[in-house]
Amino acid sequence: MNRELILKGTNVSKHFGALKALEDVDFELYRGEILGIIGPNGAGKTTLLSVINGTLSITHGRIFFKEREITGLRPFRVAELGISRTFQIVKPFPGMTTLENAAIGALFGKAPEKKMSRAMEKAREMIGKVALKGKENILVERLNVSERKRLELARALTQDPEILLLDEVMAGLTPREIEDIMAVIQEVNRGGTTIMVIEHVMKAIMGISSRIIVLHHGQKIAEGTPNEITENRQVIAAYLGERYSKRFEEVSRAGN
C-alpha cells in the first residue's frame, strides 16, 4: 500500500554554540498516522518540533511539507500552511476566558476566520471536543493543569491543521486524565489530522502511536513499531543504562 508522505526532514540539525541539540536527524511523517517521538530528557524532542514549526531557526538540514520546502519559515507562515502545535510549557493568555483563548487560534492557521463571532463558534466546538464544556467563561487563571493542557489542544485544533504537533500534552496528568487525552488525540486522528506527538508517558505513547522515533543526545537511534522499539537494545540502554540492556539481551536469549 502506497502511503502519502506529508512531512519530511533530512539532516535536520540545531546547534546552540557547541551543544548539538539535533544532529542530522531524518524523519518522515505519513498522512493519517500518529508518529510518536520519545527519548530521555535533553534528547532533542522539543527542539525538533520547534525547528519544524519555525519557533527555532535550523542550523542545517531541510524540511518539506507536501514537497514544499518550509525550512526557516516563520511560525505564522507554517501555521498558515496547515501545521499547528502545542507547547510543553502551557502559557494561556492571562485575563481572558477559556473561550477567548481558544478563539485566538481560529484567527490564524490554514483558513483564518475573518469574523470574531465565527472564531468563537469554532472555539466553542473545540472546547467541547476536548471535554472543557462548561468552562468557556472561566478566566484561564482558574483552570487547573489538566484543563490548561486541554485548552492548549483546543486552541491548536481551531486552526484546522493537517498536521498537529503535540508536545507532552499528558505531562502531569492523572491516569484517568491521560486516558481522556489519549481518546481525544485518537478521535482527532480519526477525523483526518496527522499527528506527531512527544510524550514521556510510555503507556500512552505506545498505545496511540503507529510508529515511533527515538532520539538520544540529539540523534535518531531507532525507528519502528511500538513492539520493535520496546525490544530495541539501544533504546533500552538509552533509558536504563548499558548494563541493564546487556542483562535484557541475556534474558531474551535464554528465553529463546
Image (cartoon, grey):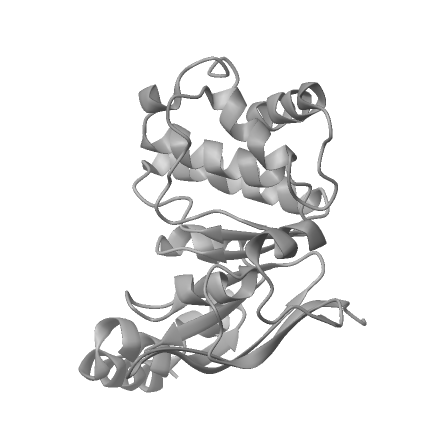
Q: How many marks?
A: 0
**Residue 250 drawn at (x, y percent):** 27, 86
Question: Residue extending furthest right?
Answer: 2
Q: Is residue 227 above or below residue 164?
A: below
Q: Is residue 138 above or below residue 2?
A: above
Question: Residue extending furthest left?
Answer: 243
Question: Is 87 on the left or on the right of 77, as rendered?
Answer: left
Q: Is residue 10 visible?
A: no
Question: Is 192 on the left or on the right of 103, as rendered?
Answer: right
Q: Is residue 142 above or below residue 87?
A: above
**Residue 147 drawn at (x, y percent):** 40, 28
Quadrant location, the C terminus: bottom left
Tell me where residue 244 sits by quadrant.
Answer: bottom left
Front residue (pair 83, 164): 83
Q: Residue at x 65, y 58 (%)?
A: 33
Front residue (pair 14, 246): 14
Q: Residue at x 37, y 32 (%)?
A: 146
**Residue 39 drawn at (x, y percent):** 36, 68
Q: Residue at x 55, y 82 (%)?
A: 61
Tell me where residue 138 sits by quadrant.
Answer: top left
Q: Is residue 238 visible?
A: yes
**Residue 154 drawn at (x, y percent):** 55, 34
Front residue (pair 139, 5): 139
